[in-house]
Amino acid sequence: MVEIRPKNVTRNARQLRLDTLVRLRWLAIVGQAAAVTGVRFGLGFPLPFGLCFLVIAASVWVNLLLRIQFPASHRLSDNAATVLLAFDILQLGALLYLTGGLENPFAMLFLAPVLISATALKPERTLGLGLLAVGSASLLVLAHRPLPWFPGQSFTLPFLYVSGIWTAILLGTAFTGIYAWRVAEEARQLAQALAATELVLAREQHLSQLDGLAAAAAHELGTPLATIALVAKELNHTLGRDGPVADDLKLLREQVERCRTILTKLTSMGQEQGGFLETVSLSHLVEEIVAPQRALGLDIEVIARGDGPEPMGHKNPGVIYGLSNILDNAADFAASRVTVEACWSPHEVFIEIRDDGPGYAPDILLRVGEPYVTTRSAAQRSETDEEDGGSGLGLGLFIAKTLIERSGAQLTLTNAAPPASGAIARIVWPRHAFDRGAAISPQGAPAGTLKEQGRNSHM
């Protein structure tokens, strides 16, 4: 399977689709042609009609060339997209030069190419295009043809007012560019983080399916192996222990026993790990996420207490992955101890994971759980990247939060109240949602329909 790295996803998400840009440019061409035609023939204002349409025709030729040269699905490189948007700025500047400069109310269209760049290109390219737009507007303040007006009359705006229009273009370019870039960047990061979450879910589901396949293989192969063992035993009695193939028959029986041992391990593995819909108690769920950390020598205190019978829930690989991720994060930053507390009441079930480390930094605490917000230092991220090729990017807690909240729980990440120190992760499920896992009795008889169990399973 091809691994999708965040850097590759980011690069592909930024590339502008040619068909999108061409369609926008056709819309601009139609608007420019309609405006020039309406002013000349609708209002009767004199203007250099032929030169205006020559400038508009330049955009038409570029669009036709792009359509002929590339397929509609082609994605433009950053350089190509930058050149096209720069051409649009210069083409608009030439058209405004012929029709009154900044006195023309359509001068605000300088913002359009910068806005497109902010949503699809890197900030430094958007900055360059913004400077080009502001530079073109500055030249139009100093040099331009008269604004088309009624024959025999002239219309000239005061220089102060034109300067105000120039300032509006400058501020509008800066504000809309930054605003559009920020919104688009957050949308890209969220989409990439959700894609990473889906990959994690798919991986966990594949592992669960492998458990089922292992159990099925053990069951299906048991009968033919028993037949082979029986035939080998009969041949051993028929040919005798000292026959010419006695050694071969002995080897055959040994290999059959070996296969049986392997299948027994596969079956026990499936029983230990459980299937996707296995019902487990809250304490067993906690022990499953804690056991790997204990094997590494970490001091983990587990507290389990509650009011009434212990809740049962369906074993969900996504939730187990999310809880394990949070526990891993606590173990990484703990000074000496991590506490996992599992409690229940008639109304709710919660798991609280606490460590005695430094806790979240104040600037991180407000955004923790969002994509690409990491609590690790640059050195830690570099070391993690080298070890597992792409982690440490601030997606761990986001993925854990997404997977856990999909189960119907609410995840809260806070710091311990002074004078204590450390981070606290609290996961709370409504009791009725968690207890739906008990719909499967210990004997395996369903208490409700399979459709209801599939719909109501959360843990």
Image: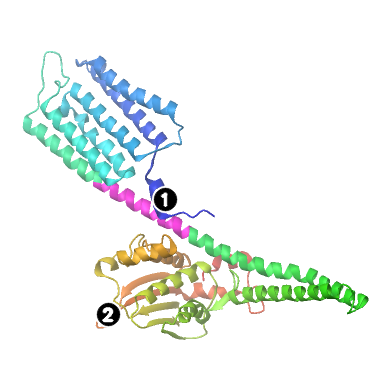
Whole-angstrom CA distance, mark 2 to mark 1, is: 41 Å
Residue closest to the eye, 402 or 440: 402
Q: Find residue 440 and report its horizontal and vertical position in percent.
A: 62, 74
Residue at mark 1:
8
> Reading the chain from its start, which is encountered first: label 2 or label 1?
1
Callout 2: helix, strand or loop?
loop
Looking at the picture, the colour scheme in use is rainbow
Q: Residue at x 16, y 29 (%)?
A: 102
Residue closest to the eye, 407 or 227: 227
Q: Find residue 219 and report its horizontal and vertical position in percent.
A: 73, 70
Relative to 276, residue 94 above or below: above
Q: Residue furthest right?
A: 238
Residue at mark 2:
417
Q: Residue at x 27, y 46 (%)?
A: 123
Please state the extent of the stretch shown in magenta in the rendering: 178-198
Q: Residues within 10 Å of mark 2 (few under 14, many from 20)?
A: few
Residue closest to the eye, 41 or 14: 14
Callout 1: helix, strand or loop?
helix
Amino acid type of the residue that numbered disc 1 sits on in the rendered structure:
Asn
Relative to 421, residue 389 above or below: above
Q: Quadrant of residue 390?
A: bottom left
Q: Residue furthest top?
A: 152
